């Protein structure tokens, strides 16, 4: 919880947290076993732009510490954070850019 900036909220129930805080709790839960690869399906879905940036910064920080992040998003602004972007439509790869 400290790693995701919520050490002070450990005794709070989900209904007492914002959407962004709940999203960070989900990330913290995913990190408990120290995975090398993190799969993030729409990690900023339903979040405001400020909170989305905070979540993406957290994922960038995790990546800089050696984690591989595999993320699915429909938002170009969020995809712009990635080193590699694979665009798909109807199960077909349209574009593979980055690496």
Image: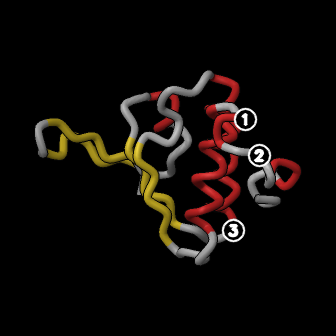
Report whether 72 appears left or right of 58.
left
State which tag comes first along the sequence, 3 or 1: 1
Q: How far separated are the C-alphas under marks 2 and 1?
A: 6 Å
Question: Which residue is nearer to you in this view: 80 or 39?
Answer: 39
Q: Which residue is mark 3?
A: 65
Counting from the top left corner in percent of width and height, residue 30 is at 56, 64
Residue drawn at (36%, 31%) of the image: 74
Image quarter hosting the C terminus: bottom left
Question: Which residue is nearer to you in this view: 21 or 91?
Answer: 21
Report whether 16 appears left or right of 75.
right
SS class, disc 3: loop
Which of the 4 image quadrants contains residue 87? top left
Report whether 87 appears left or right of 38.
left
Q: How far separated are the C-alphas under marks 2 and 3?
A: 28 Å
Residue drawn at (57%, 27%) of the image: 47
How many numbered marks have been drawn onto this rendered protein structure? 3
SS class, disc 2: loop
Q: How far separated are the C-alphas under marks 3 and 1?
A: 30 Å
Give the label, 3 or 1, closer to the camera. 1
Question: Which residue is nearer to you in this view: 55 or 7?
Answer: 7
Residue drawn at (70%, 38%) of the image: 54
Q: Are marks 2 and 1 in contact (CB under 8 Å)?
A: yes
Look at the picture and state if 16 lies above or below 72: above
Counting from the top left corner in percent of width and height, residue 17 is at 71, 36
Which of the 4 image quadrants contains residue 34? bottom right
Q: Which residue is mark 2?
A: 12
Q: Which residue is mark 1?
A: 16
Counting from the top left corner in percent of width and height, residue 13 is at 70, 44
Counting from the top left corner in percent of width and height, residue 78 is at 51, 34
Report whether 63 appears left or right of 95.
right
Image quarter hosting the N terminus: bottom right
């Amino acid at each position: 919880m400290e790693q995701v900036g919520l050490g002070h909220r450990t005794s709070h129930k989900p209904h007492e947290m914002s959407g962004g805080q709940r999203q960070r709790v989900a990330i913290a839960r995913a990190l408990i076993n120290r995975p090398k690869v993190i799969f993030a399906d729409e990690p900023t879905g339903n979040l405001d732009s400020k909170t989305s940036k905070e979540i993406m910064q957290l994922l960038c920080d995790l990546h800089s510490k050696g984690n591989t992040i595999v993320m699915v998003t429909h938002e170009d602004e969020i995809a712009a954070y990635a080193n590699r972007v694979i665009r798909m439509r109807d199960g077909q790869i349209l574009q593979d850019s980055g690496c």
